[in-house]
Amino acid sequence: MKIIGRKLEKRELEQCDRSSKSELVCVYGRRRVGKTFLVEQTFGDYFAFRATGLEKGNTRQQLKAFNQRLIAAGAKTNSTPKDWFEAFSRLEEILSGENIILSPHNKKIVFFDEFPWFATAKSDFLLAFEEFWNRCGTQHGDILFIMCGSATSWIIKNVIDNTGSLYHRVTAQIFLKPFSLAESESFFKDREFGWSREQILECQMVFGGLPYFMDLLNGDESFGQNIDRLLFRQSAILKDETIRLLEATLKKSPIYENILHLLSQHLYGMKKSDCQTELNVSVGSFSRATEDLVKCGYIAEYKRNYESGNPLYLQLVDPFLMFHYHFLSQDNKLSCYDDLISNTGAYSNWRGHAFETLCWFHIAQIKKALGISGVKTSSFPWSNLEQKDSVQIDLVIERADKITNICEIKCTEHPFVMTKDVDLSLIRKRDIYQQKTGTKDALKIVMISAMGLSGTAHTEHISNVITMDDLFEP
C-alpha cells in the first residue's frame, strides 16, 4: 500500500540507516496515527528482528511472546527467558549471527513496536534494555534500533528525557502528527473516493486526520453512511474507541476521563486552577495527569497574552475526542448521522468549534495565506468574558513586524454573509482588544471562512479573507 505524506519522517529514518554509527530512534505519537505503518513502509522486509509488546500482558506473557520472535529469528534456545537480561542476551546472539538480514546500507534493523507495553510493573525490561544498548548499541556501529509507542507521555519520560543510563542516547526522535488537510486529500485521491473538499473537511473535523480511521472509510458510501457504520450502529467498530484510546496510552485512572469530560463542556478552555478545583483532586495528581494529556496531544495548555496574572488555560483539542464527548458519550448519545445534523443547534455549535480547532492545526497555512510565512508570530485565543465589555476573539496572530491579526472564524455550508451587525461586532472586538491590551501594533481584521464571503457589502474593515482552500495548501 502506498504511503501518503510523511516525506520528512521517512527521509529521517533513511538517513539513520545510511549513517556510520548505531542509531537509537524513537517514533512516537497518538494511537492510530500510523507509526508502525511508517516504519514498515520505509524498511519493508529488512528487519533483522522485530517484536511487539502485548497491551495487557504480564511480564511472563511478554517474555513468552518475545521468545517466539527470537525463535523465528533463528534462536537456538527454545525455553522462555527467565528475565529481560537473558532475553536481550539472546537477541545479541542473533544479531551477531552470520545469516542476519541487513538493510540496503548494511544496518541491522531492530524494531520494537509498542515499546512501553514491554515495561510491565516491577519488570526489569527498561534496565535490561539500557544495559543492552549501552553495551551492544554503542560498541558497534551497525545497529538501527527503532522503538515505537502510543503511550507518548511514557516515551518522553522514560526514554527521551531519561536522566539515567539512557541519558542522551536517543539519536533521533520522530513525533508523528495526524495528516494535514493536504495529506488527507492526497489519501482520498489515492483511494479514488471522489470526495469534495467540503466532505474531506467534515471528515477531518470528526476523525482528526488519523490514517487508521480514514482507512476504515468506504468510498462507495456517503460520509453519513460511513459515520453510521463506524460510530453510531450497535456494533460500530469505533463506538468504544475513546475508552480503548485512554487505556492504551495512559494509566488506568479515572482522572484522565474526568478531565477530558469537563473540558469538553468548555469549548474555549478553562483556567487550569478552576479545572483542578472543580474536579476536587490533589494538585500533584492533577498536574501529572494534565501533563500526560498534553504530551499525548489530547489537550493544549496555554496562556492568553495580556491577561492579568497570566493564568494557564486547558483546552480539549483532539477532534475525535471532541466529537465523542459531543455526540457519542452517555450524556449525548445519538443513534445515527441524521439525528446529528437534524439537531441544528448542537451540530452547528460543534461544527464551528471543530473548524476553529482545525485552523489551530493549520496555523502555517494561515500564515502562508497572509504572506507572513517567514515572520515570527505568537498565536492564541483571547477573551475578557469576565469583564463588562466582554468579547471573544477566535484567534489572535501577534506578529514580529508590529501587526496583529484579529481573526474571526466561521464554518458555514454557504459563503458567509457579512451584515452591518457583523461588521460592527468585528470593529468592537478590535477596539476592545486594543483598549484592554494596550498594544501599539496595527490591528487588522481577518475573516477565516470555510466557504468564503458572500458579496462585498460591509467588508471594508476586513484586510484578508482566508478560505477552506487556503487550509488545503501543503
Image (cartoon, rainbow, N blue to C red):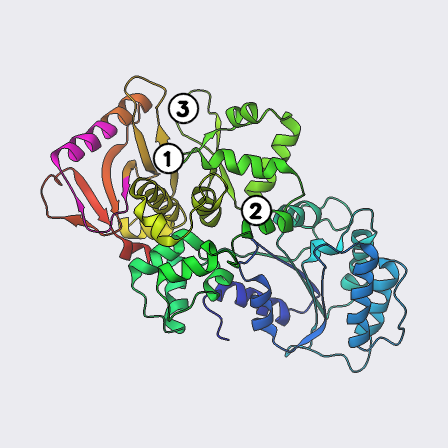
**Residue type for callout 3:** Glu
Q: Which residue is denoted by mark 2 in the rendering? A: 296
In this view of the protein, which residue sits in the foreground, 170 or 40?
A: 40
Label 1 Cα crowd, 10 Å radius (few <14 / some 14-19 / many 20+): some
Spatial CA span between label 2 and label 1 = 21 Å
Residue 190 location in percent, x, y? 40, 73
Q: Residue at x 77, y 45 (%)?
A: 164
Q: Could you tell which of marks 1 and 3 lies nearer the N-terminus? A: 3
- Image quadrant where residue 17 sits: bottom right
Spatial CA span between label 3 and label 2 = 27 Å
Q: Residue 166, labelled with which disc?
A: none
In this view of the protein, which residue sits in the foreground, 240 or 146?
A: 240
Outermost residue toward the bottom? 99
Q: Could you tell which of marks 2 and 1 lies nearer the N-terminus? A: 2
Q: Is residue 279 left or right of residue 125?
A: left
In this view of the protein, which residue sits in the foreground, 395 or 440?
A: 395
Residue 64 location in percent, x, y? 82, 64
Q: Residue at x 32, y 59 (%)?
A: 199
Q: Which residue is denoted by mark 3 in the rendering? A: 307
